[in-house]
Amino acid sequence: MFPKTLIVAIAFLALVSMACGITIDLPVKDVNVGSTQTDEIFVPPIETSESVDVSIAFGAGELTIDPGADQALIEGTAVYNVKDFKPDIIVSGNEVRLETGDLEIKGIPNFSDNYRNEWDLKLGDQPMDLTIGAGAYQGNYEFGGLALNSLHISDGAAQVGVSFSSPNPVEMDSLRYDTGFSNVELRDLANSNAEEVVFKSGAGDYTLDFSGELQRDMDVTIDTGFSSVKIIVPSGVSARVFFEGGFSNVDVRGDWEKSGGEYTNPGEGPEISINVNAGAGNLELRNR
């Protein structure tokens, strides 16, 4: 896990870098750490014939999400020792929002090294459109078997692992991931059953592994800055990779065949079409 003071500093510097030409003179604001609290989180199933819109807004800390909420839409715990990290649950019709409580900071947050903000959540099998927004944090997500119609994850400076260990029982329209300066690994993406995958990032280290059961054609777009990108496709799965940009090195191993700016992984059945746009960095193509 990133040191907590480091990820907060990175997140702040990222914000500053986007404000080119603006002079910022902000005071440092201490964030008081108190006794450790544990809150139970429980959201019952929503009575609707439509997909449920679930939104999770998380700040700094550690967020874990797994399947397995048998009698709930969401259940789990939140452990924190900053009172304003207390989670809020808002339910309106078929929309559910779980968010970190009010933490108003004027200036640069000065978290002590011993602050805690850890959410451990389980999701139920009700069909949902899931949105996760986070800041500087560590995320561990297992979505295998969940009925996800869409998934959108966005974060700042993060260390995140996403896995689909078993197939999505419904067709996912779109899987989108937007990140800043991060280390992200997406595993078993074929099991997501997504028609479209969009991955956008700044600098960092990224792995997209398309293992799993590919049930239909998948269109993938990767837009990245100065970064290292690894793409893994199993042998025998039909895939094509096109790329534009300033990759200083393209490392190819396995069954991949090159023709001009196109790389092909020979196979049968549904096809994965991947378009990569990059500023600079390294691209690796691998088989599993």
Image (spheres, grey):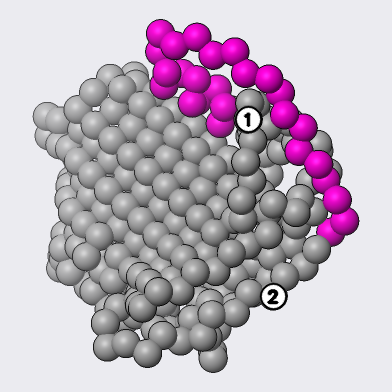
SS at circle 2: strand
Q: Residues within 10 Å of mark 1 (few under 14, many from 20)?
A: few
- Residue 166 or residue 124, whichever sits in front: 124
- Would you name the residue on which mark 1 appears? 106
Q: Which quarter shows the C terminus? A: bottom left
The picture quadrant where one finds residue 195 is bottom left
Residue 116 seen in render: no
The picture quadrant where one finds residue 261 is top left
Q: Identity of the amino acid at label 2?
A: Glu
Q: Taking 247 as reference, is 276 above or below it?
A: below
Residue sitting at x 59%, y 70%: 121
User: Which label is found at residue 40?
Assistant: 2
In the image, the segment drawn in magenta is: 11-36
Based on the picture, tell me whether residue 183 belongs to the magenta stretch.
no
User: Which label is found at residue 186?
Assistant: none
Q: Which quarter shows the N terminus? A: top right
State which tag comes first along the sequence, 2 or 1: 2
SS at circle 1: loop
- Location of residue 199 in the rendering, given as x and y in whole percent from the top left corner: 32, 45
Q: Residues within 10 Å of mark 2 (few under 14, many from 20)?
A: few
Residue 80 seen in render: yes
Residue sitting at x 38%, y 36%: 201
- Location of residue 245 in the rendering, given as x and y in whole percent from the top left corner: 23, 23
The answer for how far apart the CA atoms under marks 2 and 1 are is 30 Å
Residue sitting at x 26%, y 82%: 50
Outermost residue toward the right in this view: 35
